[in-house]
Amino acid sequence: MKKSIITIERQYGSGGSNIGRLAAEKLGINCYNRQILEMAAEKCGISAEYLESAEESVPTSFLYSLLLSASPGRTTEENLPLSDKVFLMESRIISEIAENEDNFVLVGRCGSYILEEKGCFSVYIYAPHDARIKRAVSEYGVAENKAESVLKKADKRRETFFNVNTGRNWQDKDIYSLCLNSAELGDELCAEMIVKAYTEYNARFRAET
């Protein structure tokens, strides 16, 4: 299957968002990141920050069962916890974008899972712990004494949201097309490598079909 869409999962502080933007610019296509969360927030009339925090509150199966049985007069979707509603809303938005755009870059939001049938060139960006702490302080403006807790919280949120909604392991490099260490390679080279691998793969696919 042709991998027409680039999806990027990334550790906090690895520069994955910037790398995704750079790759999209080089290819002349759109890059979607936090915009997906903001679109979902607009649809349901609450803040993006509140929706983002909801991703951290994944219910246990026991609580989930209680919730589903609590209001039998409501639809199944209405009974879902907010974390699941966020995923459903974002999935619909992402699918709508994919209906209108053949090629784009999507950062985060379980993109490789949601768009699997469309064909995704899935990328995982990671970096050593110390390098991510350094970037958080120097580029993201995180206070040095808070960087460790911010990093752990962000990674946990991303991992939990991905694992619960996909049934896969966010850190399992076997599920991605390409894995890059941004501390070793730098953002610019990572973007170039993504573009080269993506372009060459699709060129080979076209030649074989």
Image: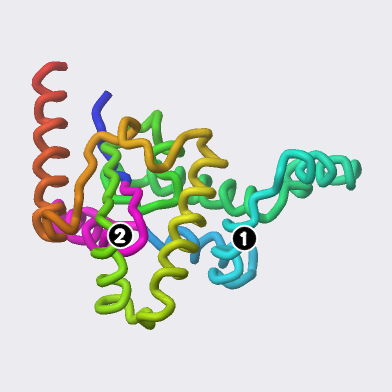
Q: Quadrant of the N terminus?
A: top left
Residue 45 against residue 1 in the figure, above or below: below
Q: Look at mark 1 in the image and give the residue it sits on.
A: 54
Task: Choose top left, top right, bottom left or bottom right for residue 152.
Answer: bottom left
- Magenta residues span 8-32
Task: Choose mark 2 or mark 1, whichever is in front.
Answer: 2
Q: Is residue 8 left or right of residue 154?
A: left
> Can you give x and y, in whole percent of width and height, for residue 57 in the image?
64, 56
**Residue 13 lies in the magenta stretch:** yes
Q: Is residue 36 left or right of residue 195?
A: right
Q: Quadrant of the C terminus?
A: top left
Q: Tag on residue 129? A: 2
Q: What secondary structure is found at the residue carrying circle 1?
A: helix
Give the residue displayed 49% in from the left and 61% down from the top: 37
Q: Amino acid at mark 2?
A: His
> Can you give x and y, in whole percent of width and height, for residue 166 in the image?
51, 37
Give the residue displayed 59% in from the left and 72% down from the top: 47
* Between 39 and 120, the one nearer to me in the picture: 120
User: Whole-Å distance between the Cαs marked 2 and 1?
Assistant: 26 Å
